[in-house]
Amino acid sequence: MYETCIFDLYGTLVDIRTEESGTELWEKLALFYGYYGACYQGEELHQAFLQTVQEMEAGHPKLRQDSHEAFPEIEIERVFEELYRKKGVTLPLEHAVYTGQLFRILSTEYLRLYEGTRKMLETLKKHGKKMYLLSNAQKIFTEYEMRALNIANYFDGIFISSEHGVKKPDIRFFEKLLETYGICREQAIMIGNDGICDIEGAKEAGLAALYVHSNLSPEEDAPNADYLLEEMDPEKMTEILLS
């Protein structure tokens, strides 16, 4: 029986769709920048954003770029801060955080829990499971989205890649979580929807792994997981994690 459950977030517990290339998004965000004296045209801001991200990502290995990951190896608020500076505007970092959150809201088409997810988390908590989150994501997005979905309180610890400068499947990300919370790897299992980031990473770290194929799973061969679910099924996931 597993004492510890380590969950991925997007595509495993949370269903999300974002669209970050739309013209209207960048025109609205450019208007917001203009409020504070950083005057951009929409497409100009979009290209400046992409260039700034590329500059900040330099030296970070890329695996795959899923839209919901939102550049997880950097702190995205630093990008929005730099976009103000490029127009000669200096504002507190907190303002860049708000700008980034506006970007996220404008780019999000929907955000919701998979049906049955809350019941699964409540059941696992009731049975005394320790639960942790290990997510390739941005703190300024994920922390607030978890709050909006009211699920943060289920977790004994939350690790978000943008805070640590490293992302799954890098074993350092797994090891840091294990060491920080004193997790016994022999009694822990990783649950995720990505065969490389979640499953291969977990196996390299000596963890058991449960793979669930969701609507956000990358196109790939079935991974070498201890448990495989061909579709999202929190009830079945609960059975496995309590067995």
Image (cartoon, grey):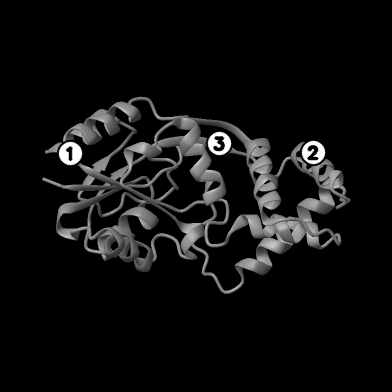
Residue count near mark 3 (Cα–Cα under 10 Å), binned few <14, some 14–19, many ≥20: some
* Residue at x-position 58% and y-position 59%: 75
**The disc labelled 2 sits on which kind of residue?**
Lys
Q: Is residue 242 left or right of residue 75?
A: left
Q: Amino acid at mark 3?
A: Arg
**Left or right of 41: which side holds 96?**
left
Percent x, y of residue 143: 49, 44
Which numbered marker is on residue 28? 2
Q: Residues under labels 2 and 3: Cα distance?
A: 19 Å
Rendered image quadrant of residue 119: top left
Callout 1 secondary element: loop
Q: Quadrant of residue 236?
A: top left
Above or below: residue 156 compared with residue 125: below
Q: Is residue 138 left or right of residue 238?
A: right
Q: Is residue 10 above or below residue 75?
A: above
Residue at position x 68%, y 36% in the image: 106
User: In the image, residue 222 lies at what x, y percent?
Assistant: 31, 49
Q: What residue is at 52 percent from the left and 40 percent from the top? A: 144
Give the label on residue 17, or none. Answer: 3
N-term mark: 2 or 1:
2
Asked if residue 120 is positioned above or below residue 198 in the image, the reply reads above
Q: Residues within 10 Å of mark 1 (few under 14, many from 20)?
A: few
Query: Which of the pair 44/154 is nearer the observer?
Result: 154
Mark earlier in primary sequence (2, 3)? 3
Q: CA distance from mark 2 to mark 1?
A: 46 Å
The mark lying in front, picked from 2 and 1, is 1
| Amino acid tagged 1 | Gly
Q: Quadrant of the N terminus?
A: top left
Can you identify the residue that label 1 sits on?
128
Please identify, in this view, whether the residue under mark 2 or under mark 3 is nearer the observer.
2
Whether tag 2 and tag 3 are in contact, CB under 8 A, the answer is no
Rendering coords of residue 163 (x, y %): 49, 59
